[in-house]
Every structure is written in structure tokens, then in C-alpha cells.
Amino acid sequence: MSDLHELCYFKSRPITRDVYLTPLKEYLKAGIPATYTTEEAYNYENDIEEEPSSTTTPMHLICEYVPKDLTEEEEDVVLLMMETLWLNGAGWCLTNDKNETPGCVLLRRGLHGSKFWESCVDSGVRAEVLLRKLNDPNVEFLEEEEVGYNEVESEEIPELVEERSERRSGAWERGQSQQFSEETEEPIEKKQKVNIDEVEE
């Protein structure tokens, strides 16, 4: 059994963020899936290559071992643990070795209608809504459009730079100290300066 699974047995009290929620996030961040089962951990530890027939996930363990005499602060921590697992892909419909979903575990324990129960229901509803949207033929998914660019072949770049340099240097050699447009590379005509004092009223 992994440390992630051990965490969900709530062997120590009080249940605090530092002792439970923070390590949970660290395990998930390290790459342990939210759906990692006790059966998979057992097979790994015992070099068993067979596919497990049941899926007892961390969510099952939380629903099975969450104490019924929680303080309000402890309840909040457990709910945050559940939400963290949901957001990381925990399955609300996976079944454990007793063929129970996390919701079924809570129902058996008499926790129907609790905040933990509501968390499972909300997750199931979100999953169903998303599934219906994905299967809706009227839903159009945006695809990344290819953006066209006026690309210049790498072989042409030195010639292009040289050509622009020659055009500018040639102008200077002819005594035409002209400014060039950065976009068109064409010379910009200078406006003649007018002395206001010389303008007759």
C-alpha cells in the first residue's frame, strides 16, 4: 500500500491541512494518479502483472474511513481532500473490492445526505453534463487554425539583407541623405523647411 493510500485512513487526529491536505497535493504533484488503487499498489509490491479486477481508489478509502465525529475544521479539510482528488481525475463511478462506488460506501455507512455525499453527487453530475456535451452533435469544437506567414527562405535572407544595404549605401554615395521606410524600403521625401519669417503675410 502506498503512502497516498495510508493517508486516506485518517489514523491520526486532528485532521489538519498540514498533516493531510498538503501531503495529498504533494503526492499528486509527484505524479501519483488520483485513481491509483490499492490493488495496483499490491500487485506492484508483489511483482504481479495481472490486471486487478477491482479499483479501490483513495476516494473509496476516504469515504470508508472518514470519522463521523469530525469537528467543523476537520470536515472542511476532508472536503478539500475530496475536491482535490476530483479535480485530479478521481472517478465517482469506479468500484472497490465490494463492488461499491464512493457514494455507495457513504450510503452503507449512513452518511447519505452528508457534505461528503453531496461532494460525490456533484462530481457525478459534472461528469454526466460534460459527457452529454461531448456527445452532443450540435456542439462545435474550435480547432487551432493554421496561421499563414510570408516566410522567406533561409538561403534568400543574406541576399535580401545585402540588397537593402546596397540600396541605402548607394543613396548616401550619391549625396542623397534620405530616410527609408522600414516597410517598403522606399526613400521618404523630405519636407522642405519653411522659415516663417520669410513668408509674406
Image (cartoon, grey):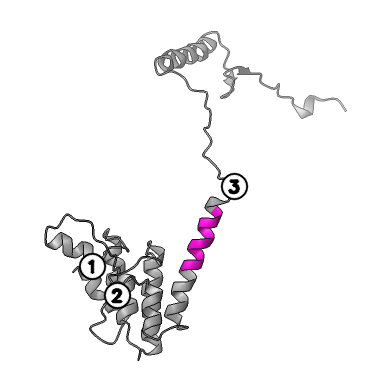
The part of the image, by quadrant, that contains residue 116 is bottom left
* Up-down relation of residue 111 to residue 194 (above or below): below
The quarter of the image holding the C terminus is top right
Instruction: Tell me if 100 is positioned left or right of 27 in this view.
Output: right
Q: Residue at x 29, y 76 (%)?
A: 20
Instruction: Report the front residue among 28 and 22.
Output: 28
Give the residues drawn in magenta, as a range.
124-133
The part of the image, by quadrant, that contains residue 23 is bottom left
Instruction: Tell me if 51 is positioned left or right of 198 in this view.
Output: left
Residue 116 among magenta residues? no
Q: CA distance from mark 1 to mark 2?
A: 9 Å
Residue behind mark 1:
38
Query: Most prominent secondary structure in the magenta stretch?
Result: helix
The local secondary structure at tag 2 comes to helix
> Percent x, y for residue 57?
30, 68
Residue behind mark 2:
61
The local secondary structure at tag 3 comes to loop
> Percent x, y for residue 89?
38, 61
Task: Estimate how packed mark 3 is, as few (under 14), some (14 to 19) or many (20 or more) residues with alpha carbons within 10 Å.
Answer: few
Instruction: Tell me if 24 is positioned left or right of 194 in this view.
Output: left
The part of the image, by quadrant, that contains residue 96 is bottom left
Q: Marks 3 and 1: CB-CB under 8 Å?
A: no
Rendered image: mark on residue 75: none
Task: Estimate how packed mark 1 is, as few (under 14), some (14 to 19) or many (20 or more) residues with alpha carbons within 10 Å.
Answer: many
Residue behind mark 3:
137
**Along the polypeptide, which appears first: circle 1 or circle 2?**
1
Hey, what amino acid is under mark 3?
Pro
**Along the polypeptide, which appears first: circle 3 or circle 2?**
2
Q: CA distance from mark 3 to mark 1?
A: 39 Å
Hey, what amino acid is under mark 1?
Thr
Q: Residue at x 56, y 24 (%)?
A: 182
